[in-house]
Image: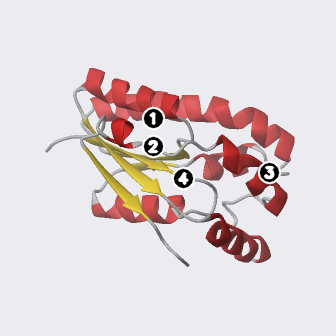
Amino acid sequence: MNTELHIICGLPCSGKSTLAKKLEVDLPGLRLGPDEWLVDLIPDRNQEEVGRQRPILNSIQWKLAQRVLSLGCNVILEHGFWSPQERLEAAKGCANLNVKIHLHYMNVAMSVLGSRLDRRNQNLPNDCFYIAPKMLEQWAPDFVPPDSDELELFNSYQIYEPEI
């Protein structure tokens, strides 16, 4: 069996967790999502504290993912991977471990993200955080979609363009 890392790239409400949960069963693999851990670490869901802890947690989960991959188990990371640097680090890590890496890019229009965010905020799941609509608008420019050159770094990639 070839060991694989699946990274899921996209903004909040793009469907990252939904896809990760499906991959977890279909592959199978260990799914590592930051929100579920952050809810346990920060029960009062303080946004400032979540913002401080998220990069630390992402680093911890990346180290755990590398160890699990080295043991021959598939891993699904749903951190969002907003920057080319984050995605390049994952690709280099996989090359060092001699495992395959697959990118799943959630290319969702802002209008769709906004509608999904409104629905999510109205019935907030236990493993999610409230996100103010203005925050999604502020974060959007920080997200750098993968370009065609970057996509070539991965063993495979899939682009999802949901409209609902």
1 with respect to 62 (left or right): left
Nearer the observer: mark 3 or 4; the answer is 4
Question: Nearest the camera: 56 or 12?
Answer: 12
**Residue behind mark 3:** 43
Nearer the observer: mark 2 or 4; the answer is 2
Q: Residues within 10 Å of mark 2 (few under 14, many from 20)?
A: many
Question: Could you tell me which residue is drawn at 54 percent across and 64 percent down?
Answer: 108
Cα–Cα span, label 2 and label 1: 9 Å
Q: Are marks 3 and 2 in contact (CB under 8 Å)?
A: no
Cα–Cα span, label 4 and label 1: 12 Å
Which amino acid lies under the numbered mark 1 shown in the image of this protein? Arg
Quadrant the C terminus occupies: bottom right
Where disc 2 sits, the SS reads: loop
Nearer the observer: mark 2 or 1; the answer is 2
**Residue behind mark 4:** 10
Which amino acid lies under the numbered mark 4 shown in the image of this protein? Gly
Nearer the observer: mark 1 or 3; the answer is 1
**Residue behind mark 1:** 87
Where disc 1 sits, the SS reads: helix
Q: Are marks 2 and 1 in contact (CB under 8 Å)?
A: yes
Question: Could you tell me which residue is drawn at 34 percent across and 51 percent down?
Answer: 29
Which amino acid lies under the numbered mark 2 shown in the image of this protein? Pro
Judging from the image, the colouring scheme is: secondary structure
Estimate the x, y position of residue 133 in percent, counting from the top left: 80, 62
Estimate the x, y position of residue 52 in percent, counting from the top left: 77, 33
Question: Nearest the camera: 109 or 29?
Answer: 109
* Earlier residue among tags 2 and 1: 1
